Image (tube, rainbow, N blue to C red):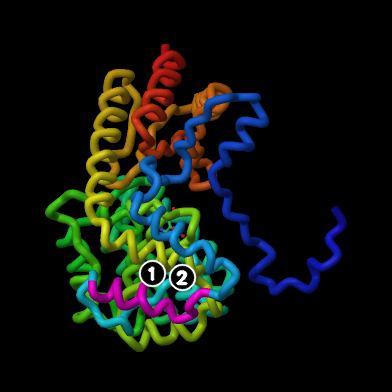
Amino acid sequence: MTKLFEKLLQPQITGIQTYVPGKPISELQREYNLSRVSKLASNENPLGASPKVLQAIRDQLADIGRYPDGSAYYLTHEMAKFLNREPEEVAFGNGSNEMLELVARIFAGPGDEIVYSQYAFAIYAISAQIVGAKGVEVPAKGWGHDLPAILKAITPKTKVVYLANPNNPTGTMFTKDEWEAFISKVPSDVIVVLDEAYFEYVNDTDYANGLEYIDDYPNLLVSRTFSKAYGLASLRLGYLVGHKELIGYINKLRAPFNVNHYAQVAAVAAIKDQNFVKKTVDYNLSGMAQFLAVFDKLNIDYIPSYGNFVCASFGDKTNEVNQELLKKGVITRPLAGYAMPEYLRISIGSSTENQHFISVITSLMK
Ligand SMILES: Cc1ncc(COP(=O)(O)O)c(C=O)c1O
């Protein structure tokens, strides 16, 4: 294709790699003429959403022609109450993705630096590129964030640090002690974004809940999402919690009506159904245990994970294994784009989907 407009591009836009999402089910069905597909590629909730959420959406369908509440008033108040924070300390976005990128747009630009870990969620590097800041990738330690090294990478040019706990795609977690040693030394004029997209899944007393640090560190923004444990990925809803001033800037810069009415209605119902979240987390733990037992039995190396997914290594056979899984209707996530070409990331699915993956992988490994 002739590039008509390349010359017009802002210089930082030229090199941006397009984010590659997991393959959709319908595409694989068409490609291989499959009747049954198990999508274990996007860390979605295999239980879907709470029935109470579905009912709340149904009850509001007649409102589809109206703009949503641009201030997400009820949702913001419900969430603030749930988190025991002030409404002015919470901002919602079209997925946490929008919020993560917005932080870079607001606080960094050409000449600035944005720091994140090797193997961290791809959007951090992309956000740095979008705003023309220098992305500083700090080598990982044991697939996880090396917080002391990240601290050393902060310079007077650093405007934003992104951390994911647990991290995607590796599933690693840093501990409360590591976190406290880190955050207490970060200069107060550097924004720390602590991405807790998978925090509901963590069942470990060493985990640091970011919200507990907001009062002590006004430069901290905690990012969470309704896409994972709440099962609302298609509605696109995430949020940031932090100091009122920071949240004020976020609200100023986000697009008007960035959170649709059904996301707002669904989230209010979802927050009130914590039993569903608990059921999701228990379901995930048993699916994870099932996967790990199979990996152990088949001698497949994996990275222990605190999320709703796990990375397994198939060495130099990874591409082949991925192709065979696809042919049999199992979509996982190859990680070559994360410079982890030997790994597939497998989301924990429903017990039927997990069984599908297990039976294909078991016959492949033979
Ligand atoms: C670590 C992490 N942060 C943020 C997101 C973005 O999620 P969403 O935009 O659906 O809220 C994801 C999605 O996979 C993720 O893994």
| Residue 184 visible in the picture | no
Q: Is residue 12 above or below residue 46?
A: below
> Which residue is painted at 37% across and 46% down in the image?
170
| Residue 148 visible in the picture | yes
Check disc 2 and report its element: helix, strand or loop: strand
The residue to which callout 2 is attached is: 93
Viewer-closest of 203 and 169: 203
> Which residue is painted at 45% across and 37% down in the image?
40
* Prevalent SS, magenta region: helix
Q: Is residue 196 above or below residue 185?
A: above
Check disc 1 and report its element: helix, strand or loop: strand
Ligand 1's quadrant: bottom left
The quarter of the image holding the C terminus is top left
Work out how far the residue at label 1 is from the one at label 2, CA to CA, in angstroms.
Answer: 6 Å
Residue 120 at what x, y percent from top left? 41, 55
Looking at the image, residue 168 sits to the left or right of residue 87; the answer is: right
Question: What amino acid does circle 1 point to?
Answer: Tyr
Q: Is residue 231 above or below residue 152?
A: above
Q: Residues within 10 Å of mark 2 (few under 14, many from 20)?
A: many
Give the magenta part as a residue range.
Answer: 68-81
Residue 35 occupies quadrant: top right
The furthest residue to the left: 205
Residue 316 at what x, y percent from top left? 49, 27
Question: What amino acid does circle 2 point to?
Answer: Gly
The residue to which callout 1 is attached is: 239
Residue 237 is a magenta residue: no
The answer to whether mark 2 is within 8 Å of ligand 1 is yes
| Tag 1 and tag 2, C-beta contact below 8 Å | yes
Residue 71 is a magenta residue: yes
Viewer-closest of 191 and 103: 103
